[in-house]
Amino acid sequence: MSLLRPNPMNSRMAEGVGRVGFRKWYERELLSSHAYLVLAFLSVIGLIGSMEAFGLGSNYDKVTNVVSIVVCAVVGAWSLRRYLFLLMRAEEVANQANCSACGEYGRFTVVGEDRSRAETEVRCRKCSHRWTISVID
């Protein structure tokens, strides 16, 4: 099972763009990725606090602190990985969102999706030019 499987907050590019448009999908991807960055930051604060409290208290408190350190480290690593994945996916799509015929940016509609090759065919709203966007999912 992949740690980076799609979830309801981060739909596939073709579904998201088809539902709300490219610009809103891109904005949501960036906001979602930065929420994972905040979670990573909070887990680092928890990690530092648990390490500081480790020297104080009884053996039971030390075991609790070790568990807290492990949980904070795992959550921090997972959220940092998720942040980077979502950010890089959004940037990869944004770099391919220019129509090569007329130069229009981000104004396209989804024509079709090939999940086996991770590609989405799009059509420019201005000049009806078609091109393919490769997507990491």
Image (spheres, helix red, strand yellow):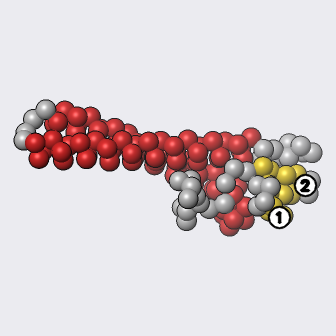
| The image quarter in which residue 54 lies | top left
Question: x and y percent of residue 57 in the render?
Answer: 7, 39
In this figure, which residue is indicated by the disc labeled 1? 112
- What residue is drawn where x is 28% and y is 41%? 69
Check disc 2 and report its element: helix, strand or loop: strand
Give the side of residue 56 with respect to residue 37, left or right. left
- What residue is drawn where x is 25% and y is 47%? 67
Question: x and y percent of residue 4 in the render?
Answer: 56, 53
Identity, as a three-letter code, of the amino acid under mark 2: Arg
Give the side of residue 19 with respect to residue 118, left or right. left
Quarter of the image for the N terminus: give it.
bottom right
- What residue is drawn where x is 74% and y is 41%? 95
Question: x and y percent of residue 55 in the render?
Answer: 13, 32
Question: x and y percent of residue 137 in the render?
Answer: 67, 54
Give the side of residue 52 with respect to residue 58, left or right. right
In this figure, which residue is indicated by the disc labeled 2? 130
Residue 91, placed above or below residue 22: above
In this orientation, does residue 131 appear?
yes
Q: Nearer the viewer, mark 2 or mark 1?
A: 1
Sequence-wise, the earlier of marks 2 and 1 is 1
Check disc 1 and report its element: helix, strand or loop: strand
Which residue ends up furthest to the left in the rendered image? 58
66 or 36, nearer to the observer: 66
76 or 39, nearer to the observer: 76
In this orientation, does residue 109 appear?
no
Q: Residues within 10 Å of mark 2 (few under 14, many from 20)?
A: some
